[in-house]
Amino acid sequence: EGQLVESGGAVVRPGVSLRLSCAASGFTFDDHGMSWVRQAPGKGLEWVSGLNWNGDTTYYADSVKGRFTISRDNGKKFLYLQMDSLRVDDTAVYHCARGGRTTYCSGRTCLPYWYFDLWGRGTLVTVSS
Amino acid sequence: QSVLTQSPSVSGVPGQRVTISCTGSNSNIGAGYHVHWYQQLPGAAPKLLIYGNFHRPSGVPDRFSGSTSGTSASLAITGLQVEDEADYYCQSHDDSREVIFGGGTKLTVL
């Protein structure tokens, strides 16, 4: 089935950096792309970033591009999110999720395909002055 | 403001059938990108409910079903149960964004 456990959330000031970690267990970690999805207090889900099985292809939401960096260590079965230049609107619970960009083909048409079939409970990041 | 539009809330009584809609556009659902649905129980992590428009992961009851039509998608829940009370989110891909979520629908079981 698998399990994802996030850590590293904290209360920080605007402009500082923070690194989140996600420990994976119970499944073959390097068989899967991985992602981070966040949820601001009382709000909906927002995809933040994702990467492929070996980390050499990464994707970012426009809201974090240039400030956040996603990475993974397949040997340790960890996913990371380095967050720099944090802003107040980055305040959210950050969920680690199993799932990356794949392709679905039907006939001669192939389309990007993302979904997340395993989630962690999340770690809270609060950015406040 | 979400690219995929969901009604903020829906309600039903036990045993009833309810549907949750997800309205997109020709740059996402209408372009053929698949829709996936998640259930988030209060205080819990989201859980994949439907993937690839209508496929159910192992362990998801067949009371839950997904469909698409044009630029919209729907999640139907039959035989509504008290434990179905949760937030439900649709998700897809867009021509200009890798991953998009709907704003979520809160299901209340009266």
Image: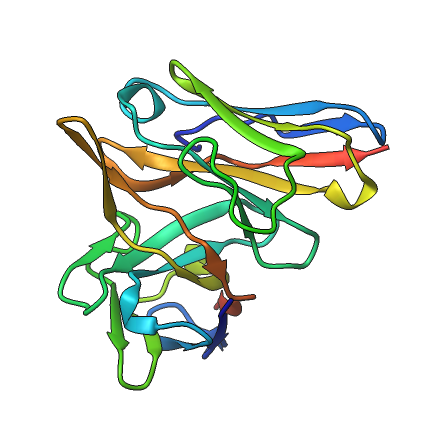
> Outermost residue, bottom direction?
A76
Residue at 77% in and 35% down: B108
- State whether residue A117 appears in this view: yes
Res. A69 image quadrant: bottom left
Q: Specify the quadrant of the image occupied by residue B14.
A: top right
Up-down relation of residue B58 to residue A15 (above or below): above
Q: Nearest the camera: A95 or A52?
A: A52
Residue A42 vertical position relative to residue B52 in the rendered view, above or below: below
Instruction: List x then y, in percent, for residue B46.
Output: 56, 53
Residue B15: percent from the left, percent from the top?
83, 28
Q: Is residue A58 left or right of residue B28?
A: left
Residue A101 in the image: state x and y as whole percent. 25, 50
The residue under the point 22% across, 31% down is B95
Q: On the rendered structure, is A87 left or right of A91? A: left
Please tell me which residue lies in front, B32 or A41.
B32
Residue A16 visible in the shown view: no
Percent position of residue A39, x then y: 51, 53
Q: How many marks?
A: 0
The answer to whether B49 appears left or right of B3 in the picture is: right
Q: Look at 77% across and 30% down and name the residue there.
A: B79
Rendered view: A112 above or below A9:
above
* Depth order, front residue of A45/A102: A102
